Amino acid sequence: MTPLQTAEITGIVTETARLTREQYVFPEVGEALATLLADRLAEGRYQQAADPEALGRLVTEDLQSVNQDRHLRLKFHRVAVPDTEDGAVLAELDREADLSLGGVPLVERLGGGVARLKLAPIIFPLAMGAEPTTAGFNLVARAEALILDLRECVGGHPEAVAHISAYLLDEPTHLTTLYDRQDGEYRQLWSPAHVPGPRFGGAKPLYVLTSKATFSGAEAMAYDLQQQGRAVVVGERSGGGANPRQGFTVHPHLEATIPVSRSINPVSGTNWEGTGITPDIETDPAEALAVAHREALAEVARRGGDTHSAAEARRLLAGGTEAGHDGEPI
């Protein structure tokens, strides 16, 4: 990669400072950070950056030094990205969607009427992920309990989060409100009234797995469902990124990602920025699936009466096998 010249560094940092001042959802912090970048540029801090990756690292350290907003950064992209609004992230999402089956890499039956659906690496925009998401949630709709695995999910598109939430609720629900700095308006996000195919619904047991890697839109899903009293969150405290971002290409390999709005939950009146989501059942993320499965089995057994799923759940809780009704292969 071609080394950066002094004039290039000056232009990149100056443009990043301008965007931070004009776009960041918290104007006073944006102004302070823009001044900080200008001061560090004048001091020669960034001239030590031999390439875009090094410059991105240095500028990100300074951008996150005031309020530790992990969405606010100068992100390096090894593959050159288009000079369009959010062009960098869209190009990256297209590659990731191809590698992850549209963001639904795993659906499985765990036994006792419990299903697990994994979303990773992010919850893709509906244009990229609607079909695999619909297929996955249609497949688990008949389960008696569901474990939604977000331990490796690092983000998500707000409309896609609302779409998925509708499969886990019975009726349109106000999930969050987004405040946008540029127009000063508040926009409510609701789960839609209609989704393709059957829903898992809003009554059956639901568990959401989290880790410190769970971030941004994935946290939004976990937090919204937790605040609505719809899901039990199991695992580790999440990463703490609640301010939706927008991307601006400032160099073929560098994207200034600036949070331009903030989330406000209608139940809590706040969000998880900087704190992460506190699990209802806190455990090592490596153990979260086993813990959630046992909780789900106990709930299926309690609710199920004489159903096959309840009988199997009771056997599994007692240490039996997952095979046929008498412990023999079907």
Image (spheres, rainbow, N blue to C red):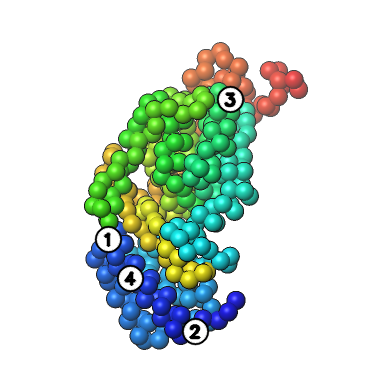
Residue 83 horizontal/vertical position (percent)? 47, 64
* Upstream in sequence: badge 3 or badge 2: 2
| Vertical relation: 248 (above or below) 36 | above
The image's mark for residue 5 is: 2
Determine which quarter of the picture holds residue 226.
top left
Query: Which quarter of the rendering shows the N terminus?
Result: bottom right
Tag 4, which secondary structure? Answer: helix
Residue annotated with mark 3: 113
Amino acid type at circle 4 is Arg
Q: Residue at x 37, y 40 (%)?
A: 224
Closer to us: 201 or 91: 91
For mark 2, does the 10 Å Cα neighbourhood hold few (<14), some (14 to 19), or many (20 or more) residues? few
Calculate the distance from the C-alpha at mark 3 to the C-alpha at mark 2.
Answer: 61 Å
Q: Residue at x 48, y 58 (%)?
A: 87
Calculate the distance from the C-alpha at mark 4 to the C-alpha at mark 1.
Answer: 14 Å
Amino acid type at circle 3 is Gly
For mark 4, does the 10 Å Cα neighbourhood hold few (<14), some (14 to 19), or many (20 or more) residues? some
